[in-house]
Amino acid sequence: MYSSKSNLIIGFHGCDESVANKLLNNPNNIKISDKPYDWLGHGVYFWENNYQRALEWAKYKQKQGKLEKASVIGAVLTLDYCLDLVDSEFINALSVYYKAMEDDFEMNNKDLPKNSDVAKDEHKDKLIRELDCAVIEYMHQKIDEQYSSDIETNGFSDFKILILREEFSRRVVQLFRELVFRKEAIFKYA
């Protein structure tokens, strides 16, 4: 399902200055976003090769009163196995998981989550992405279940999963430890 990307990227994370400092000084304490409206599912978000966009996002959040001081922290990342939503193959796969989720919800007499507008969004872009998040999380859950079943039944799986959900925090912590150790790989902007 996931495709290996053999490249390194520089990712920029827009956040409060205190969060950037915590990531640099205490990489064992990384907060993973798990809100039901996280657009692309739960995790840590980076802007690929785009410091300016990360800063704009942080400044926007500061203007909303959600951050005290906008800041950006950068990291050298490898995508390894990932779901590339720029690639039609993965967009189509996501559509299959959406249909499966829709069928599951219908079978269980449950309403699908919905994307909705933010009251002050003049563009009406449906910024509360509960459906989008649910589909991504459903897909991850189903892949994890299939992977575990394959391992239990066959001793291997055709799914190329680099890390499972339980290992995510450990991997991110290790990544930040490596980046802190290799000072040349970290860019911190205030």
Image (cartoon, rainbow, N blue to C red):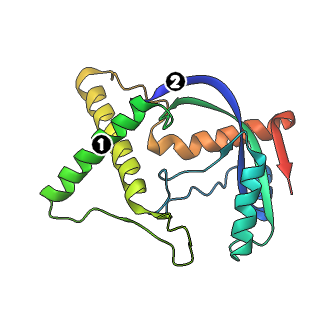
- Tell me where residue 99 appears, x and y as whole percent: 24, 46
**Mark 2: few/some/many CA within 10 Å (<14, 14-19, 20+):** some
Seen in the picture, residue 122 relative to 8 is either above or below; the reply is: below
Rendered-image quadrant of the C terminus: bottom right
- Tag on residue 4? 2
Quadrant of image for the N terminus: top left
Report the amino acid beneath label 2: Ser
Q: Amino acid at mark 1?
A: Tyr
- In terms of sequence position, does the residue under pointer 1 or pointer 2 come before the other? 2
Q: 61 or 171, which lies in front?
A: 61
Q: Answer above or below: position of 81 versus 180.
A: above
- Horizontally, residue 134 falls left or right of residue 49, namely left
Q: Are marks 1 and 2 in contact (CB under 8 Å)?
A: no
User: Is 114 displayed left or right of 75 in the figure?
Assistant: left
Whether residue 23 is visible to the viewer of this picture, yes or no, is: no
Which of the 4 image quadrants contains residue 123?
bottom right
Quarter residue 76 falls in:
top right
- Cα–Cα span, label 1 and label 2: 20 Å
Q: Report x, y in % for residue 91.
A: 40, 37
Residue at (81, 40) in percent of width and height: 186
